[in-house]
Image (tube, rainbow, N blue to C red):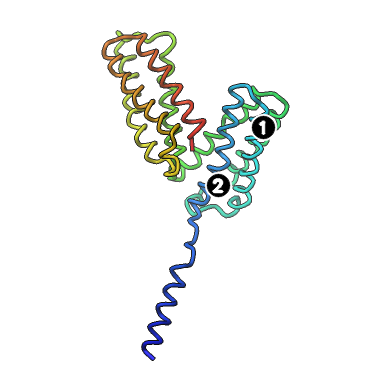
Amino acid sequence: MSQILKVLAIFCMMALTSLPLAADPLSDFNAKVSEAYSGYRAAMNYLRTGNPGLASLELSAAVDGWQTVERTYMSDPPAEFVKDDTFAATLSNVGKALNSGLDKSADGDMETAQEVLLPVRGMLFALRQRNGVRVYADCITDMNTVMDRLYVFRRPAPELGNTDVQSAIATDTRAYQKLLPTCRAMAPTAIHSDIEFVRLFDGAESSVASLMPALDARDSQAVVNVLRELRSFDRILFFRFGG
């Protein structure tokens, strides 16, 4: 009898271990948001480069993906967002912006489409930030924000004899250098070996590393050249691998 019980116990353990693990609500939410956000990022790139047709296709996918987010989580958010009284309103506002952007893009009004879509990124970033949630996309947003501050200095060429100017560039250069490996490590494992992903991050790291020597040499034109190069890497990283 004891042998039979042992066999039954083994079968029970095998059955339990073969059961699929329950999905983590936050991970599932983040994945669904990321899927819709991917279409949004691609659409913003196509609008920027003057292709409303492809932008509309990407926005249509983003709208469909966001409808899934709203259906699934509007009234049943992950535990991390339960206390956020503006959670449902944020989801609704993102959905409205995506739909409005799609309408404007389909009409060929690329400028207005970009205007109504631009706040979407900030809304999602703020939603996670105020609820203590951080994902790879947020790290890329931080990186792009630092780049925006640095890029101000490319025109006119910075007055490197001004200690305030030099200090501002140096501070943000160090911040960008610190964010690059952090964001790279946070990226989904599936894209770590992607050739373009590797090329862009390697390029950005090499580019920003050359900024401090140019700054120390007080070579304004070299600083401007590096900022233009780094901006290209930074922008493409968002559009192609922004989370």
Task: Please tell me whether residue 48 is drawn above or below residue 142 in the rendered image.
Answer: above
Residue 158 is situated, as x and y percent measured from the top left of the image, at 37, 10
The residue sitting at 35% across, 27% down in the picture is 205
Bin the neighbour count of mark 1 within 10 Å (Cα to Cα): few under 14, some 14-19, many 20 and up.
Answer: many
Q: Quadrant of the N terminus?
A: bottom left
| Sequence-first disc among 2 and 1 | 2
- The reply to whether dot 2 and dot 1 touch (C-beta < 8 Å) is no
Residue 163 is situated, as x and y percent measured from the top left of the image, at 29, 13
Q: Which residue is mark 1?
A: 56
Task: Please tell me whether residue 35 is drawn above or below residue 170 in the rendered image.
Answer: below
Tag shown at residue 169: none
Asked which quadrant contains residue 143, the reply is top left
Q: Which residue is mark 2?
A: 32
In the rendered image, the residue lying farthest to the bottom is: 1
Q: In the shown orientation, is residue 125 left or right of residue 167?
A: right
Instruction: Name the amino acid type tagged 2.
Output: Lys
In the rendered image, the residue lying farthest to the right is: 107
Residue 26 is situated, as x and y percent measured from the top left of the image, at 49, 51
The residue sitting at 69% across, 23% down in the picture is 109
Give the structural element (helix, strand or loop) at label 2.
helix
Residue 80 is situated, as x and y percent measured from the top left of the image, at 47, 51
The residue sitting at 46% across, 22% down in the picture is 232
Bin the neighbour count of mark 2 within 10 Å (Cα to Cα): few under 14, some 14-19, many 20 and up.
Answer: some
Q: In the shown orientation, is residue 21 left or right of residue 217?
A: right
Q: CA distance from mark 2 to mark 1?
A: 20 Å
Front-most of 55 and 120? 55
Give the structural element (helix, strand or loop) at label 1.
helix
Q: In the shown orientation, is residue 148 left or right of residue 105?
A: left
Instruction: Name the amino acid type tagged 1.
Output: Ser
The residue sitting at 35% across, 37% down in the picture is 182
Task: Please tell me whether residue 33 is drawn above or below residue 168 in the rendered image.
Answer: below
